[in-house]
Image (spheres, helix red, strand yellow):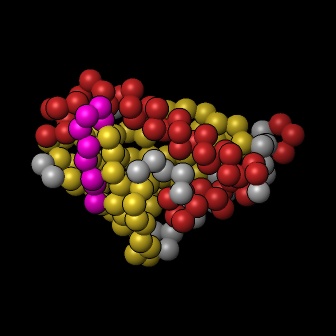
Amino acid sequence: MLLKGDVIIHAPRKKVWDFLTDPNQIGQCVPGVEKIETIEPLKKYRGVVSVGLGSVKARFTGDVDVLELDEPNHAKLKAHGTATGSAADAISAMSLSDGLDNSTLLQWTADINVSGQLASLVSRLMVPVSQKLAGVFYDEVRRRIEKE
């Protein structure tokens, strides 16, 4: 499933970039994050995320690899996680550009593939729930950056 969106953040691009490339800041914005561990700064991270899709809950453990990092313009990540009887893979990208009045336009995409038990049980919920979680994430990112 491919998700995408645009967010305007009322802050300079460098400030937005610094926030979005700090795993501790991001971890506080992602719904369900239990733990983030830095394996290699700006290259590889490991984490645990709990996700609820309707009445089905899954706890994914996995890795995030940074594929591209062009400060302060573009980043691309690859994630792979497993939960009991399920797996998830994602490629996510973000592009930052200067907006009006010292704001930043953040354009993002996430191509997510979930397989196994979770996919077969709740396939019809995946797109709307994933889109909602992305909205919650980016709203929290914007709120935290703008209040600093």
Instruction: Say whether residue 56 is magenta.
Output: yes
Q: What percent of the width, then of the height, locates residue 64?
A: 38, 60
Q: Is residue 132 left or right of residue 13?
A: left
Query: Residue at coordinates 28% horizontally, 60% vertically from top-left?
Result: 61
**Residue 78: quadrant of the picture:** bottom left
Q: x, y percentage for residue 48?
A: 34, 60
Determine whether, in the image, residue 81 is placed left or right of residue 109.
Answer: left
x and y, in percent, of residue 112 in the image: 34, 40
Q: Is residue 39 left or right of residue 114?
A: right
| Residue range highlighted in magenta | 53-61
As for residue 12 lying within the magenta part, the answer is: no
Residue 107, above or below 45: above
- Quarter of the picture holding the C terminus: bottom right
- Residue positioned most to the top: 124
Residue lying at 15% horizontally and 52% vertically, measured from the top left: 84
In this rendered view, identify the residue nearer to me: 59 or 111.
59
Residue 121, image x and y in percent? 17, 32
Q: Which image quarter holds the N terminus?
A: top left
Q: For the point 70% across and 52% down, which residue is it?
A: 145
Q: Is residue 70 visible?
A: no
